[in-house]
Image (cartoon, coloured by chain):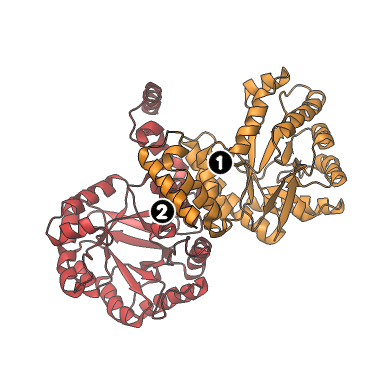
Chain colours: A red, B orange
Amino acid sequence: MTETLVASQTKEAIIGFERPFCVIGERINPTGRKKLAAEMEAGDFSTVEADAIAQAAAGAHILDVNAGVTAVDPNETEPPLMRKTLDIVQAATDLPLCIDSSVPAALAAGLEVAKGRPLVNSVTGEEDRLEVILPLVAKYNVPVVAISNDETGISEDPDVRFEVAKKIVQRAADFGIKSHDIVVDPLVMPIGAMGTAGQQVFRLCRRLREELKVNTTCGASNISFGMPNRRVLTGHFLAMAASHGMTSAIMNPLHDEDMHAIFAANVLNGTDVSCRAWTKKFREAPKAAVEGVPLSEQDERRLARENRRRRRG
Amino acid sequence: MTETLVASQTKEAIIGFERPFCVIGERINPTGRKKLAAEMEAGDFSTVEADAIAQAAAGAHILDVNAGVTAVDPNETEPPLMRKTLDIVQAATDLPLCIDSSVPAALAAGLEVAKGRPLVNSVTGEEDRLEVILPLVAKYNVPVVAISNDETGISEDPDVRFEVAKKIVQRAADFGIKSHDIVVDPLVMPIGAMGTAGQQVFRLCRRLREELKVNTTCGASNISFGMPNRRVLTGHFLAMAASHGMTSAIMNPLHDEDMHAIFAANVLNGTDVSCRAWTKKFREAPKAAVEGVPLSEQDERRLARENRRRRRG
């Protein structure tokens, strides 16, 4: 029963085989959000702050924090911006954080200021990454996301990706990092470009859980890149992946489709004990209210009835 | 690559491992629909006809037809009513049908009038059922739904339910019925009453596919019985079950949640080749139109743009 502990100064989030699916909020990431990138570069963190608060309110368990505002000279610009962004987010919420960068110096800078036990995102199977990032992870005794690609790129063969993940786990062990502190990202391809992308992930989730006994995560919305009705497709992908053993995802907690999928997956995978979370969420929020439409009289009566019933115990 | 052929006089539906998930419309069933039962008893088949047409339009591949209007003397009343109901449905649509009854005489009556190759729903592992229904199935050379319970009831142990399914397949072989003509229903329990109900079905779907090599079906909405927000839960259950190998379900094609789940599952399981069905459904029907709201100007412009693009190829 593998468990990965991620923590802020005051709050824990556990990614685990027998735990409810762990929602890692993806919003604080200027990659592909030009307006946010411009704001952050100009020292305006109002959107970062608002996104932190909104994602926490929507039920995220961990917040991903990325400060990659520019491809120009990131080694210079990203470390101080990561520090600043983490300070802002830590002041805005008490959620555990995930320090997300492809720039090792930004990960190091983040680890200096992040309180508690942040998740480092990420290391790959590339030799230069392993040599730089694993010592950092070991030094701070934190968990790390391991992406299953290496120098040869991303293999289209899921069994090759499994072997890359296995290599990372073995190399991490050399640095004293336990496998329960490694969260493997099996890499999600766009289904529009590769028709087997879904089945690959499902198979990898099962193998990673049964053979390597590690937790898993992914960038969930990759699956629906370029497709119409992306949210519904991403939502179902999340529930299906969870049923094959995926234990967390970097996703958008502000999308109802994603969150409903997670709530349903927890019920159906038996990690929402006695369906308590589901019942609480949907008994208290009739459909109309969930969708932001004013309550009908019927909903109000139903809500009142539910509340009376609950008070009576 | 197991395939079960179901057919009307003019149309085929194939339930199969490498096929898109087969949607069996559940609506023509007076059990639990008092008004429909009263209408059918009074010889009014207008709702039956309307339900047949609506389900076909919504994308059902097969229509389930049940004529169980009363628990009183069903051996007398149900066979003629099954005949009549099948006549009505066969006149209203050209879809293949599923003759659904717990009364063997009603199944026999249905087989006399159903054209093509209907699916018989169902036989169980109970000795008296096997002895009466398997010869009927063999005589008409039709496929049959096998429900995995026997004289001892429904086991809570999925491995016992697997053994019951295996026994039915073996007994059917004695009558010359091939395993590809048996569609096993592993039995779906309400998740609110049994927290492991989802995981049981997922495990059974995998075993039934890998070990017995049979197609599978279920009464999908059972899973959400008694729960709030049933449709979203049932939809995610369908997609998750499909990803573990379930190949059909008796479900409500008029519920968008169910149908969107099936479309998503087909994309993610690789049975919607090149995502054609998904793209056609959602590119042609902007969200507002799907939900029955008139198109906005923006939607209309988008639709026109899409159509131009498609014409250009």
Left or right of A258: which side holds A40? left
* Residue A114 visible (yes or no): yes
Q: Secondary structure at mark 1?
A: helix
Q: Secondary structure at mark 2?
A: loop
Left or right of A186: which side holds B16? right
Between B267 and B221, the one lying in front of the other is: B267
* Residue with the most extreme left position: A43
**Residue at image point 60% right, 37% down:** B57
Is B92 placed above or below A160 here? above
Give how far across and how far down residue A107 sits, in percent: 23, 70
Label 2 is placed on what type of residue? Phe
**Residue at image point 42% right, 63% down:** A216
| Image-quadrant location for residue B115 | top right
Q: Which residue is mark 1?
A: B223
Q: Quadrant of the image for the C terminus of chain A?
A: top left
Give how far across and how far down residue B18 sits, in percent: 64, 58
Give how far across and how far down residue A222 sits, in percent: 40, 60
Q: Which residue is mark 2?
A: A21
Label 1 is placed on what type of residue? Ile
